[in-house]
Image (cartoon, rainbow, N blue to C red):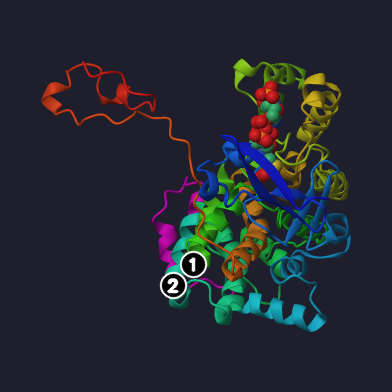
Amino acid sequence: MNNSAKLELDGRIYELPLVVGTEGERAVDISQLRQQSGWITLDEGYGNTGSCRSNITFIDGEKGILRYRGVPIEELAEASTFIETAFLIIYGQLPTQRELRRFSELLTRSENIHEDMKYHFEGFPSNAHPMAILSSMINAASCFYPELMRGYDPATFEAQAARLISQVRTIAAFAYRKSRGMPIIYPKPSFKYTANFLHMMFSDPYEDYDLKPEVVRALDLIFLLHADHEQNCSTATVRFIASSQANLFASAAAGVCALWGPLHGGANQAVIEMLDHIRSTGDDGSRFIQEVKDKKSGKRLMGFGHRVYKHYDPRAKIIKRKCDELLNALKVEDPLLDIAKRLEETALRDPYFVERRLYPNVDFYSGIIMRAIGIPVEMFTVVFAIGRMPGWIANYREISMGSASRIYRPRQIYTGSNQRPYVPISERGSDGGSASRGTGQPAQPAR
Ligand code: CMC
């Protein structure tokens, strides 16, 4: 294979180096193109842009493959735990027994948030969305650790990473309790990570929550399956923020904000709301599918489609199986599961979805598991955020350690007005108003 590509522009040939990843992914390195030719590349939505080299997660969207640090997601789902997988993602290899014990102890020691942070929760309205509370509180937590202000520091990174993984779960549970007017339940050092989250969410001061092993395992699996997913919107956001050498907590808080949107992590909440809507309107799903296919409706089949997977999302396969298993074990019948399965069957036969290669993604069935556990719908994306924390931390570390890392700063093609003079306000006319002028379209001549 050649090690460069040739590009002809304005009658000149430019040689562009080729880059090949360890799984054979190929890229044309255009980083010097502007300097050499004055041209940039344009790729709105970054659908065809590699923004970094990374050795954390590999996805083959055509084949439905997902591996963390080389280990297939199916093997981790079968045999690992969220915390062991978190270690793998952050540090690059599966921990030894000693390393895992040390990591778990560090998480336990870090599980309490600073007592003064409890007062911050008072400032939020009781109906505040927990994702807003989560991102604010992660940022607020950074105020309590002055060493974070130095940016990435290998000497304190391990402690900071453990704090973030451990405390995001405490903050999430406290936010939920507050929103329901319930007293806060402190973490119990004897519980493992996921059991402790369920304890803080659902115990009462006078009675501990009954921790069913199958529930703990199902939620742990959800965390594990969400733990990383290469350059998705929130992880790319974390890298973006980290590239300016902002601290780990500030970068993760931004990741939470990016995750919140319904096209990303917010889809798990949107799926349940969609299924509920279908049920409450007496539809069996077929009417909704017709609406989705009509572009004018502006509706999407939530939990379907993916930028990278043009095949069944391997996480969705595992979650769907777990969903059946858990509902059977708990003897729960959820009509939304039947609607979801019917929707999936219909969509996978429908030419609209087949031609566009739209399959269920990780969010399609995860909400049904969380409903069965008793997690309220507004907490679904928070659960996703807890799960995604190791991926954000690993990406933060990778960009902070990378000697070749530069601040993220894309270019643009400007499409606004050409140069025009400043017009004094007295000469601008009286109607129309500035709102109609601020459309981003090339300006109309001033009247
Ligand atoms: N329902 C109906 N049509 C869809 C859907 C959907 N869920 N997803 C994509 N399409 C259509 C889209 O309208 C477009 O059609 P056309 O070619 O006629 O214009 C075509 O498929 C390609 O879609 P796109 O919007 O260009 O794809 P994208 O890569 O920009 O977007 C996506 C990916 C995940 C945002 C999108 O599939 C979507 O909105 N899905 C629903 C939301 C969702 O489930 N998000 C969770 C994603 S997985 C977990 C995560 O990342 O958080």
Q: Give the number of the disc on residue 149.
A: 2
Q: Give the number of the disc on residue 100.
A: none
Give above or below for 27 relative to 183.
above
Q: Count residues near mark 2 (Cα–Cα under 10 Å), then give few for <14, some for 14-19, many for 20+.
A: some
In-image side of 177 versus 108 (left or right): left
Image marks 1 and 2: residues in contact by CB distance under 8 Å: yes
The amino acid type of the residue labelled 2 equals Met
- The segment highlighted magenta reads 110-133
Which image quadrant is residue 303 in? top right
Q: What residue is rendered at 83% in x and 23% in y?
A: 346
In-image side of 217 versus 202 (left or right): right
The amino acid type of the residue labelled 1 equals Asn
Give above or below for 37 relative to 87.
above
Q: What residue is rendered at 55% in x and 60% in y?
A: 252
Between discs 1 and 2, the one toward the N terminus: 2
Q: Tell which of 152 and 411 is nearer to you.
A: 411
Residue at image mark 1: 247
Which image quadrant is residue 285 in? top right
